[in-house]
Amino acid sequence: MFSVAVVEDDPITLDLITDALETRLDATVYPFTRSKFARDFLLQQSSESISLIISDQIMPDYDGLSLLKTCQSSGLNVPFLLITADPSKELVIEARKLQVTGFLAKPLNMEELVQKSKEVVSKAS
């Protein structure tokens, strides 16, 4: 059993991700449609309380990489999966520099999301 923070500004996509992780991996999911609230939550977490962060890249307030930078600067170093519909070369290079664990392409494939989540959490533990 592990816990996942999911940050996705589209409520329908967020519900699909939450349902997939809860039902298929028995994960505790902390879902956020607002990146500002997710940021506040993540600043209160540690690697003992959260196992994985899954975040969309393009959102109001904070984008996915900004959230990752905030987590890293606060000492929260957990696997981070970035969701993007447009994996430009610049984004991939920046994400690699920040040590993003992996990418998930939109439209999301829930099987791939579940499998990748399971893989990165098992590698990290």
Image (spheres, rainbow, N blue to C red):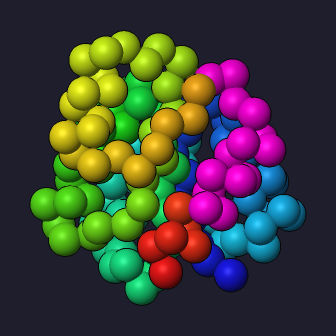
Compared across the picture, whether 66 is left or right of 79 comes to left
List x then y, in percent, for residue 12.
Answer: 74, 33
Tell me where residue 104 sits by quadrant.
top right
- Quarter of image, res 107: top right
- Magenta segment includes 117: yes
Q: State whether residue 105 is above or below residue 75.
A: above
- Residue farthest to the left? 73
Query: In this view of the protein, which residue sits in the foreground, 49 or 114?
Result: 114
| Residue 62 seen from this side | no
Magenta region, residue range = 106-119
Q: Position of residue 5 (x, y in %)?
A: 52, 60
The quarter in which the N terminus is drawn is: bottom right
Place of residue 109 in the rendered image (x, y in percent of width and height, measured from the top left): 75, 33
Q: Is residue 46 above or below residue 62?
A: below
What predominant SS class does the magenta segment belong to?
A: helix
Q: Nearer the viewer, residue 22 or 30?
A: 22
Question: Is 107 covered by the magenta stretch?
Answer: yes
Q: Is residue 96 above or below residue 86?
A: below
Q: Is residue 47 visible?
A: yes
Residue at coordinates 27% horizontally, 69% vertically from top-left? 76
Residue 94 percent location from the top left of the image: 22, 31
Q: What residue sits 47% from the left and 14% below the top?
A: 86
